[in-house]
Amino acid sequence: MTSKTITVPASIPFPARQLASVLQNLLAIPASHSVWLIENGCVVVNHRMARRPHQRVEPGDQIELDWIPMPVAAPSKKKKTSSRGPIEFLFDDPYLCVVNKPANLLTVPTRYGEGQTLLSRVERRLKDSDPKAQAFCVHRLDRDVSGVLLIAKSLEVAEAIRGQFAERKPERQYVAIISGHMEPREGTIRSYLATDSDLNRFSVNDPTKGELAVTHYRTRTEWKDASLVEVHLETGRRNQIRVHLAEQGHPILGDPRYRSEQAAHWAWPHRRIALHGETLGITHPETGEPMKFQSPWPQEFRDFQRSVTRAITKNQHKGDPKLRDNP
């Protein structure tokens, strides 16, 4: 067995100071591993054994670990990413909770009545502490998308936060890895989204035939044949980001629905979409306090960046372009 001592840095924002999240960020390990370490008695905080993944820690706290897991290898093309690990809570109070949704998990049941959804799992977790606890969906992420998701604990709180979304007040920032390079590198996509008989979404110009959808984007990094773009939503329509980027000729990698052939990439073997809800900012419905929550990149994003960067370095002598960053 090995041991390691780390000090909680002041740079970690308040919403991310739950023990499991701190371990995940500082050790660069999956959320499920950080929870496993805590629940199996491998973590000591300020000389006291830690047993709760959501225990709050503060800058300067000393964390001792009796065992450090090795990094997880990237999943093979034949292996489906699991969504059965613990749900990571980024924030939890009597009114709402904020979680880090894993990919390959429905937010809420469809008409087929799936029992294994993020909402049902969060509600079961809340009922462990309060048998009367309830969970209400405020917004959604597609099944194959990961990131920050807010759950209300009462219908009143849910309606208050939905009102913020209706008024376009929340800050919603995503990151996506797309095929090719956006031109221009920064801009706004505006259209009206309609739905066909197969539930696919597409843009129309007639406002009477679709829902207004406004997407702001900014390129962060360009590789040889892919880009990392930052996306800000002004509206939140179903499949909005996926449709808008695909219709520009740059689908999100791994998207099986919108330009799927073009969305294939040798460095993205994962059975999920390369789209992640990175930041969510709201006004607390009870206190009026502005709150912002952030979710670190999932492992698949880090693996992709590492793979394509190595490929660029390896082939620089052949004249391949270097990656470009947006400051």
Image: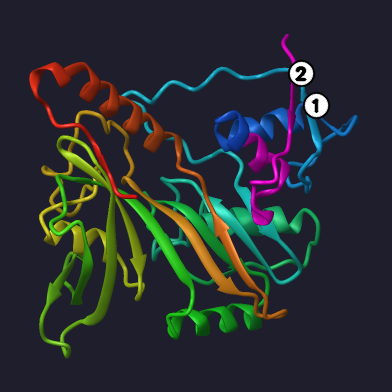
Q: Which residues are magenta?
A: 1-24
**Which of the numbered marks, if any, corresponds to residue 41?**
1
Residue 39 in percent (x, y) is at: 75, 32
Q: Residue at coordinates 67% horizontally, 75% vertically from top-left?
A: 289
Could you tell me if the residues under marks 1 and 2 are in contact, i.e. CB atoms within 8 Å?
Answer: yes
**Which of the numbered marks, if any, corresponds to residue 66?**
2
Amino acid at pointer 1: Gly
Secondary structure of the residue carrying tag 1 is loop
Residue situated in front as seen by the camera: 205 or 281: 281
* Image quadrant in which you'd find residue 321: top left
In-image side of 218 versus 179 (left or right):
right
Is 307 left, or right, of 266 in this rendering?
right
- Judged left or right of residue 172, residue 257 is left
Q: Residues within 10 Å of mark 2 (few under 14, many from 20)?
A: some
Q: Farthest residue toward the right?
A: 48
- Residue type at tag 2: Asp
Secondary structure at badge 2 equals loop
First in residue order: circle 1 vs circle 2: 1
> Which quadrant is home to the N terminus?
top right
Looking at this view, is 232 or 59 the one in front?
A: 59
* Residue 102 appears anywhere in the view: yes
- For the residue pair 246 and 115, the one nearer the viewer reads as 246
